[in-house]
Image (tube, coloured by chain):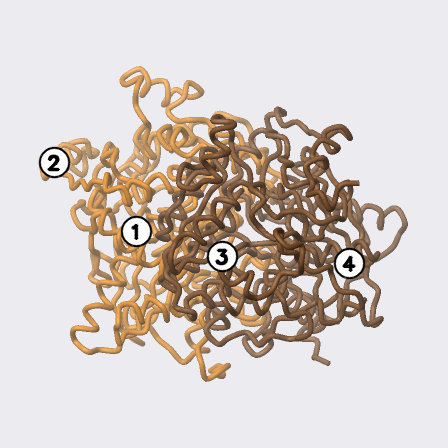
Chain colours: A brown, B orange
Amino acid sequence: MSMKRSKNVPYRFYLSAEEMPKVWYNLRADMKEQPDPMLNPATLQPVTADDLAPVFCEELVKQELDSKTRYFEIPAAIQEFYRIYRPSPLIRAYNLEKALDTPAKIYYKFEGNNTSGSHKLNSAVAQVYYAKEQGLAGLTTETGAGQWGTALAEACAYFKLPLTVYMVKCSYEQKPFRRSVMHTFGAEVIPSPSTTTQAGRAILEKDPETGGSLGCAISEAVEKAVTTPGYRYVLGSVLNQVLLHQSIIGLEAKKAMEILDEYPDLIIGCAGGGSNLGGLIAPFMQDKLLGKASPRIIAVEPASCPSFTRGRYVYDFCDTGKITPLARMYTLGCQFVPSPNHAGGLRYHGMSPILSKLYHDGYMEAVAVEQTKVFEAAVFFAKHETILPAPESAHAIRTAIDEALKCKEAGEAKTILFGLTGTGYFDMTAYEAYLNGTMTDYIPTDEDLEKAFAQLPELSRV
Amino acid sequence: MSMKRSKNVPYRFYLSAEEMPKVWYNLRADMKEQPDPMLNPATLQPVTADDLAPVFCEELVKQELDSKTRYFEIPAAIQEFYRIYRPSPLIRAYNLEKALDTPAKIYYKFEGNNTSGSHKLNSAVAQVYYAKEQGLAGLTTETGAGQWGTALAEACAYFKLPLTVYMVKCSYEQKPFRRSVMHTFGAEVIPSPSTTTQAGRAILEKDPETGGSLGCAISEAVEKAVTTPGYRYVLGSVLNQVLLHQSIIGLEAKKAMEILDEYPDLIIGCAGGGSNLGGLIAPFMQDKLLGKASPRIIAVEPASCPSFTRGRYVYDFCDTGKITPLARMYTLGCQFVPSPNHAGGLRYHGMSPILSKLYHDGYMEAVAVEQTKVFEAAVFFAKHETILPAPESAHAIRTAIDEALKCKEAGEAKTILFGLTGTGYFDMTAYEAYLNGTMTDYIPTDEDLEKAFAQLPELSRV
């Protein structure tokens, strides 16, 4: 297909402008069985474009519901924005390989090389572009660890669209600098739960001291969008449209590996709502669905929020306030909130319906890892690869290291690709806790989970 | 020379591995008149290699004193490290140009794309490599805003060399996350002034509540190095060796512009001790010294610490404790400490002797800008170019914008190149102050400066 550019694979490999993907890839087009449709919670019928129109902008509704179109052309204005910070580098982890003394070849796709510090910008720019095209007056969203809010603030500044961000209150207080970055880009940032919405007021009434949750912030952002003229809501993960936009990660990675004459035996991504994982694996999963290749694909999630490994594959609400459609996904129940000692993101109760279906059908594996092990891997990685990873990304690093060590034991020179979703500059409190030895692990008990499952919607209770 | 790669100049242009510079360029080799030599403060004679050997490692002493060798080959191990994070991109500021509606073409060389977040890593890796080669037991240094300490911690982790960082106390307290990044990379970080050195104890005795200064932290780091067996001291700016290493910035930028068929009419860099400015302009200044081209070169400094524009070109100590050699440079006097309301770096009392000489001889200009104007430019730049700049870098942005607006007025399509030295993730307190309207400016009065000049060494008093 493509020519090998150089005999030595460089540390950082960048595609040329000509080699950049011009389309997004829609995984659903190649799935033999489709994910179950989202349901309107009032009628329990599959949601229609009309149901979604008050919440999302039109083009995004089309993308959300389209399981047929294999490739979506990336609009010129989005390609233009991508060129500002993409391609992201594909990096050969020579130093990590040497430090582990493994015969495995380790590659990672690094998405932290932009001001938002993560892959979230890939979908943010797309969603803001379509909103602007539709002539909307503004957008609302929620953010937990803050990457999504930052990315969206950045894209909204570029396209000159007002933005209101509901930020999970404990993050708002623990990460004042994240908030300041969003301010700098011109966004309004409100700690959630707040008194600006019914959903927020209801939660505050029950528990005035709550630190908030992602599910609650979603409820507030959706309510604010549907009650403000010309506003719509945008979401940074879980949705089909987001996985579509994030396929740019995997398409670039696959193209780069082709040029380098490589193909991964193993693809590893961290999984919260699934945006990075779904994007990274997309074209490789296509090969698997079409029987062209059979790489192992591993989702890595926190042991404190184990939706794949301990959740149920049932219909559930996407938010705490139970105002969103129902999605069939691996879920811990929409009232589940991870233990407060859990650092960083990957704290969503559910998982992308597309990825849930693929996992359910055996196309991928999942592992859950504890955070002290994750930070151990993060610090080791930082010292050898000179990049300070986000805690989320470090979940993938942990498993990549574990797999590389298995290769060492077995004497196998496997090719590993993992997603390094972002940088950890705003997570130093957690790093400091790890270095001081005060970081703890927490694994929910079966009883904790049963309590959360009891809150599932009626149609999903066993 | 080189072929134009593509008709459209991309946003981000990266050199290929083959196009990367293999040498550093020593500006002194082409200067008609040399900077005055450093003097031993005891004898007032030019310092010798023997004088410097207890403080700096051997290879670096050679580089410091060598004004003849035009090109230094970059050792293979350093080239290897550079390949982990270099080339840095040369970015065409299309969005900024559009927002300013200027006919000027604006390019910037972005050095923030590494975990240390700045250009400082270019010299850190070189200095740590030579120290390791010499078999040293460890290194000491000082850091103000924290970029240098972070870069050095990163390089020391890579080469497995212990590091002690004296961090200016007010930064230590205001930037706990900077400190945590250094911890993560394994460095020991001590707030300065401290009780671990005589210099620190003397300053604490006079003023127990002091927030410290860069000059004082240098005194402590040097003392610690010369009193600890097998230790040496390293410095991130000012020195000839640092400018040599930083020439990688300018060499890459010039090569990239050649490939794009461009040459700057105007080169703009922020100036604290001069490491970025000296590196960025090096090969362009060579053209100027050899009469091959005559770009305008502008140093931008904070109005609150105006060494070029209001300092004296005399011999002065490099530190507050008066234990270093004397250097002839533009200086505000080694006791000068910028007003506490000054945010970010660029707070050193002196300036690189090489740059001081070139400025004195009319090869470059200098302007001083106030920080509210600097942050105004920073926020404008962030919104349009999607990169959150360090306050230091934003000094260059301010002047680049001012010059681009002059081009607009005059209808001139000049080509501007400026140095974007780093990112501002650890400077959000200052951004927040600007956004809240609580940021103030401060310009030292003539009386303030006279008071500082009165502290100059005897041979420099007029």
Distance of label 1 from label 2 (alpha carbons): 22 Å
User: In the rendering, at what x and y percent does residue A238 appear?
Assistant: 63, 54
Q: What element carries label 3?
A: loop
Crowding at dot 2, Cα within 10 Å, few <14 / some 14-19 / many 20+, comes out as few
Which of the two labelled residues, at mark 4 and mark 3, occupies the earlier sequence position? Answer: 3
- For mark 3, what is the residue? A114
Q: Which chain carries label 3?
A: A
Callout 2 touching callout 3 (CB < 8 Å): no
Distance of label 1 from label 3 (alpha carbons): 25 Å
Q: Which of B84 and A459 is in front in this view?
A: A459
User: What's under tag 2, amino acid-wise?
Assistant: Glu
Q: In this view, does B317 lie above or below A123?
A: above
Q: Is mark 2 on a helix, strand or loop?
A: helix
Quarter where residue A368 is shown: top right
Q: Specify the quadrant that holds the C terminus of chain A.
A: top right
Residue at 80%, 51% in the rendered image = A365
Which of the two labelled residues, at mark 1 and mark 2, occupies the earlier sequence position? Answer: 1
Distance of label 2 from label 3 (alpha carbons): 45 Å
Looking at the rendered structure, which numbered label has been put on residue B450? Answer: 2
Residue B418 in view here:
yes
User: In the rendering, at what x and y percent does residue B182 appear?
Assistant: 52, 36
Looking at the rendered structure, which numbered label has been put on residue A358? Answer: 4
Q: Is mark 1 on a helix, strand or loop?
A: loop
Q: Is mark 4 on a helix, strand or loop?
A: helix
Q: Nearer the viewer, residue B237 or A421?
A: A421
